[in-house]
Amino acid sequence: MGGYRLHLQVTWVGVLILSEMATSAVAAAHESALPSCLDHCGEVQIPYPFGTSDDCSLNKDFLINCTQSSTGRDQPQIDGIVVPKISMEGQLELSLKLSKKCYNESGMLSSFWRSRLLITTSTFTISNTENMFMAVGCDTYAYLHGKQYNGNFSMGCMSICQNQSNVLNGTCSGIGCCKVEIPKKVSNFSLQASSFRNHTEVWSFNPCSYAFIVKKGQFNFSSDNLSNIEDNNRTLPMVLDWTIGNERCKYAQLKSDYLCGGNSTCDDPENGYGYRCQCKKGYDGNPYLPLGCKDVNECLNPNLNNCTSPKRCINTEGNYTCSCPKWHSGDGRKDGESCTLNLGLVNKTAIASGVGFVVLLVSSTWMYLIIKQRKLIRLRERFFRQNGGVILRQQLSRQNSVETTKIFSAEELKKATNNYHENLIIGEGGFGIVYKGFLSDNRVVAIKKSKLVDKSQIEQFINEVLLLSQINHRNVVKLLGCCLETEVPLLVYEFISRGTLFEHIHHKDRSLRISWEARLKIAAETAEALSYLHCAASPPIIHRDVKSSNILLDDNYTAKVSDFGASRLIPLDQIEVFTLMQGTLGYLDPEYMQTSQLTEKSDVYSFGVILIELLTGEKALSFDRPEEERSLAMHFLSAIKEDRLFEVLEQNLGTKRNEKQLKEVANLARRCIKLKGEDRPTMKEVAAELEGLRKIDKHSWVSVGSNSEEREYLLGETSGSYTYDVAIKSSVVYDSMKDHTMVAFDGGR
């Protein structure tokens, strides 16, 4: 009878617990949305700040259209795109159609679709950790356009193959399929798929170009995708990160519309412009509702508490405690002091044990710090050896370059950049981050921290450091040294203060200040630097990424060629090198793109584009112009052919006064961008011709010295000095495929 009564009691307690858990679950479900608002659309939960009407959502960005699908089920949509899942952790999954461009057998466009998200705010950003940008096709290049840091952003992906048999299933390395990681904070995006030759050469097995963003692991490429990737308007899953507003927690918490409710905290996500809310530890629910975060009763679930005895678990607001039986003391937890019999005796042994424990703790901490410091020293020594530091030090000593080129310690550069503080970032691109640094001798330097390291190329890296350290040309940015005590070697350059040629040409408030004489001077100095690299350096150096954003201007507006991250050394017995394609669209040599044969004439082509920029004031590649004018080089050649040169020149160049010089430079630019490299002049010839044009100028003050009045007149300045303290950072603003993009085409990308 007693056993039967005990069974009834246990059963009744279980019923009460299950009932309370069910009640809590129901309450949590009802509290995910605002009162009187739908919390589901079909099978998808719609938590606030999302809602199915204006009154139920925070604003129009979070408005969900609950529409009946063709199957009769309710289906949530945003901006006309199906939303299969909304996460309170700040993510939203979409089913997005593929962007495509298809052609018939004769190369005529047969169908076209461009995928886009029309929301124009920064509430939603593409998740850089969950997605990949991909393109499929054997005659395909694709773009992702959007907004980033309140400016336009573009990136691209290129896929080429000659026949279907060359395509490898399951790989996406640029042959039939290419994929690119997506950077942080890209919003308001659209996708565009295009073709180089309208698929005429591959039409039999690949009539279309496709572009899409897809959640990682959700698309496995195969050769069959070249002909039938699109099946009944196929969609692919992608993930967006969402935030509240466009201010970080520090400022949002001061506003009256701050959204995080009680028992919640505010977080600044890495990918996004606003903030997110989350319930504090020990609470659960919707943190965006005023009272959405409810206390979690850890005592109802043994997995949520670690009491030695579950029946002694006591729930508290946001936490729980564990009690001990009578005559026992402790915290009652499995991982704590547990419960021990309390005799109430404090003797000398206990005191001695306590003192001994403190001494042991201090000693252990001291030993730990010493061991940690020694490990750090050994780690830096290992990196130094791996990065070729011993060999480089010996070579510098033999070449007597120790004084001019220094091997910095990791501590020196860490101190110079205030532990690589984000406020000292002056440039960021695909290859790494550039910091402004202040050395102990008060020199201001630029410190380049690469993102990638190829251990098989350490010997070549050492050779390039040795070579660049000995380049002493007034128009080449000086390499001051390097640091090899980190996993990725750091390079230290002289700091150039006046910004890039790109920003001086293309920023409207600056371009009017640069006269034609100044532009001709900058062009001649740049050509002289490239000629030096091609002819005087031993072995010769091909820059491979000549563009206006890699030409810096110092305090006297002297041109300085920079960024040798993509450069290649040419053996003395060779005139060309086969390399993976790399460069910047708009400046890239078309012959190099076709053959992958890198020659010094590739730099000549890129320099020709810079000459055209100086003449026209237009960007090398811009999608804001009509399609036939997007490539500045092609547009310029067309204007010359149609005798419209002076229609495309910038207005402030003194056309009448400088007519002869303008025609000569335009003709030189035309010769530099000829399709065949053998038809182009050498950089030595280009430099000589530009210097000759400067010398025959009737004005004797063309060469700019330190005299401020001459400099102001040459640059068209009529007021005080014009200081731009951050040289490299400004160019990064335009580091996109739409406006001056750096694209690494390794592996066909």
Image (tube, rainbow, N blue to C red):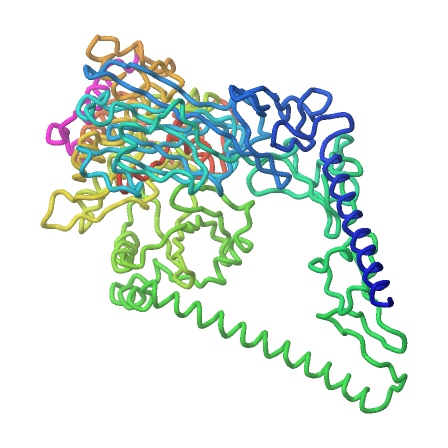
Q: Is residue 687 visible?
A: no
Q: Is residue 589 visible?
A: yes
| Residue 125 left/right relative to 662 | right
| Residue 201 left/right relative to 633 | left
The residue at 68%/79% (across/down) is: 362
Determine whether 260 is above or below 449 in the image: above
Instruction: Give the image quarter of residue 227.
Output: top left
Judge whether residue 668 is colored magenta. yes
Determine whether 716 is above or below 323 in the image: above
- Magenta span: predominant SS is helix
The residue at 48%/61% (across/down) is: 412
Judge whether residue 20 is colored magenta. no
Image coordinates for residue 374, horizontal then vertical, percent: 50, 75
The residue at 80%/70% (across/down) is: 331
Query: In the depicted view, which residue is nearer to us: 623 or 467?
Result: 623
> Which corner quadrant holds the N terminus?
bottom right
Image coordinates for residue 480, horizontal then vertical, percent: 37, 54
Find the residue positioned furthest to the front: 1
> Which corner quadrant holds the C terminus?
top left
| Residue 413 left/right relative to 531 | right
The magenta stretch spans which residues?
657-685
Image coordinates for residue 134, horizontal then vertical, percent: 37, 34
Image coordinates for residue 346, horizontal then vertical, percent: 87, 86
